[in-house]
Amino acid sequence: MKSLKNNQLYRLSVAQFLETIREPEVLFWGMIFPVLISIGLGLAFTQKSELKFQVLVVEEQPTELDSLLRIYAQPILRNGQEAHVWKVTDQVLGNTGFTFVHSDWRSAIVALKRGEADMIVSDSLGKVAYHFDPHNSQAQLVYLKLSSLIQSPVSVMDTGQSPVEPLTLKGVRYIDFLVPGLISFGIMSSIMWGISYTIIERRSQKLLRRMVATPMKKSNFLIALMFVRILMNVVEALILFFFAWLLFDIHIQGNIGALVVLFLAGNLAFTGIGVLVSSRTSRTEVGTGWINAVTMPMMILSGIFFSYHNFPEWSIGLIKLLPLTALTDGIRSIFNEGGGWMEILSPSIALSLFGITCFIAGMRLFKWY
């Protein structure tokens, strides 16, 4: 034990670990914030809550909508103005509530621009005309629900004949999609800011120059930095998974050993990127720009919060080449599809080789002062 305490790598690792955990911001953004995101989005997309839509009515003459509102809707006062609330109960697809407010065109357009309403309906020869952005998925949903309701309100409100059979399989919920993405995103963010920014900041403060002037081995400093950051990533991932399991009953359906290997390969890949990004600059402003240039595109493109298949078809192949995409897809396959060693073999090798290549290139360019 005495020889261990006198070991240079051990003491560097302990010092780096204590320096990391003493910062409240590190603990919050690394451990608590991902949990809060998963809880918030999980509750938003997994609970049986009522869909609420705001519809503005601009009419010069009564339409079939007016007669339906008198029969099925409940009149209310909204901001001193009369409105109607029409609620449709559906035990399978979830309840839907429409709030109809009469308005003029000018006010209706302004409200639509501000996001205060989802759709405008007007009269067209006594019929209902729908006005909305056809590229807005929320407005499309409002149109489909409202048009079917107006055409046949009795059949829509009678949900006993619904042909929909809800899926109850594990892995198909949004929270099942989200948590693996948050784990991989946490790995990238933790390493890029925990390693890259730390190195750049210490170089700007002339601390690296002082450290290499001591008998310290340069490799021990970087190894200690990487070891502590990977250890923190393990703790962060375990905390996130614990709360996801506790609140949303998430399970790992695949091989846990394969998950560990893929997790380490992802850490290795982003460690190499982190060292390469921080290899030269001594200005924190420049370093922050480089870190954001690496992390922001991958955060948007790699399917953390939504599927990257929403992007144009020509870009899918390029998106799959991103390290974060490979890591996220691999973790999701283990969590939700029961993936094992064969599924993670290719991404693990690719991530490891990419990380080692970036690390070697970073060390050749590395400037200690």
Image (spheres, rainbow, N blue to C red):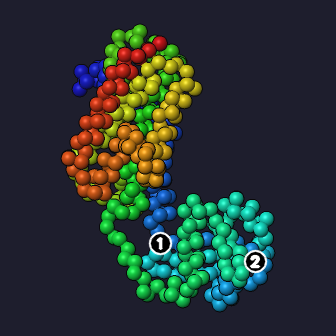
Q: Position of residue 35 (x, y in %)?
A: 45, 52
- What residue lies at 25% left-to-right and 56% top-to-bottom? 338
Relative to the observer, which residue lies in front, 157 or 13? Answer: 157
**Disc 2 and disc 1 in contact, CB within 8 angstroms:** no
- The quarter holding residue 245 reads bottom left
Q: Amino acid at mark 1?
A: Lys
Q: Work out whether 197 lies above or below 231.
A: above
Q: Which residue is mark 2?
A: 59
Question: Dot 1 lies on which element?
Answer: loop
Q: Position of residue 136 (x, y in %)?
A: 58, 61
Relative to the observer, which residue lies in front, 203 or 277? Answer: 277
**Other-residue count near label 1 (Cα within 10 Å), few / some / many at <14 / 14–19 / ≥20:** few
In the picture, measured across the screen, residue 51 lies left or right of residue 351, that is right
Q: Amino acid at mark 2?
A: Glu
Which of the labelled discs sits on residue 194, or is there none?
Answer: none
Q: Position of residue 207 (x, y in %)?
A: 48, 17
Alpha carbon distance from label 2 to label 1: 34 Å
Query: Is residue 336 visible to us here?
Result: yes
Q: Work out whether 35 lies above or below 140.
A: above
In the picture, measured across the screen, residue 309 lies left or right of residue 59, that is left
- What residue lies at 45% left-to-right and 24% top-to-bottom? 278
Q: Which residue is mark 1?
A: 48
- What residue lies at 40% left-to-right and 77% top-to-bottom? 164
Mark 2 vs 1, N-terminal side: 1
Q: Quadrant of the N terminus?
A: top left
Relative to the observer, which residue lies in front, 107 or 185? Answer: 107
Relative to the observer, which residue lies in front, 322 or 332? Answer: 322
